Amino acid sequence: MPAAVPMRINRDALVGICRHYRVRELVVFGFVLWDDFGPASDVDVLVDLAPTTPIKSLLDRAQLVVELESVFGRTIDLADKPRLYPLLALKILAARAVINAETA
């Protein structure tokens, strides 16, 4: 698993977002972990939400994306861990960097 993500992240803000939305685990994957990650690259984020998450609609999900984009300073592509296609999940889970893990 990669050791570091090549960007500064306000961890306090990220922890606050994860607590608010009851994100049990937040990981990044994809280009952010590759050598060709650049200033124009977006960030692929995978979340595992607690069953008690306040996300009940697409608007709630969009708000989570907006808040994550403010922390990362980049466009975010958000994926939900339980909804991943199984073969894709194996690749993502094998090459990811855990950014925040909270107990719900």
Image (cartoon, grey):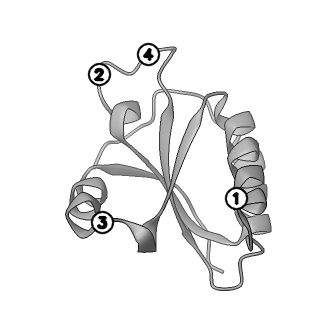
Q: Amino acid at mark 2?
A: Asp
**Residue 12 visible in rendering:** no
Q: Nearer the viewer, mark 2 or mark 1?
A: 1
Per the image, label 3 sits on a secondary structure element best described as: loop
Q: Amino acid at mark 1?
A: Arg
Q: Which mark is residue 35?
A: 2
**Residue 21 visible in rendering:** yes
Q: Is residue 93 left or right of residue 102?
A: left
Q: Which mark is residue 61?
A: 1
Q: Amino acid at mark 4?
A: Gly
Q: Earlier in the sequence, mark 2 or mark 1?
A: 2
Q: Is residue 87 left or right of residue 59?
A: left
Where does the image place residue 42, in percent across and percent down from the top left? 50, 29
Q: Amino acid at mark 3?
A: Tyr
Q: Earlier in the sequence, mark 3 or mark 4?
A: 4
Q: Residue at x 30, y 66 (%)?
A: 85
* Alpha-carbon span between mark 4 and mark 1: 26 Å
The number of numbered badges drawn on the structure is 4
- Residue at mark 3: 85
Q: Which mark is residue 38?
A: 4
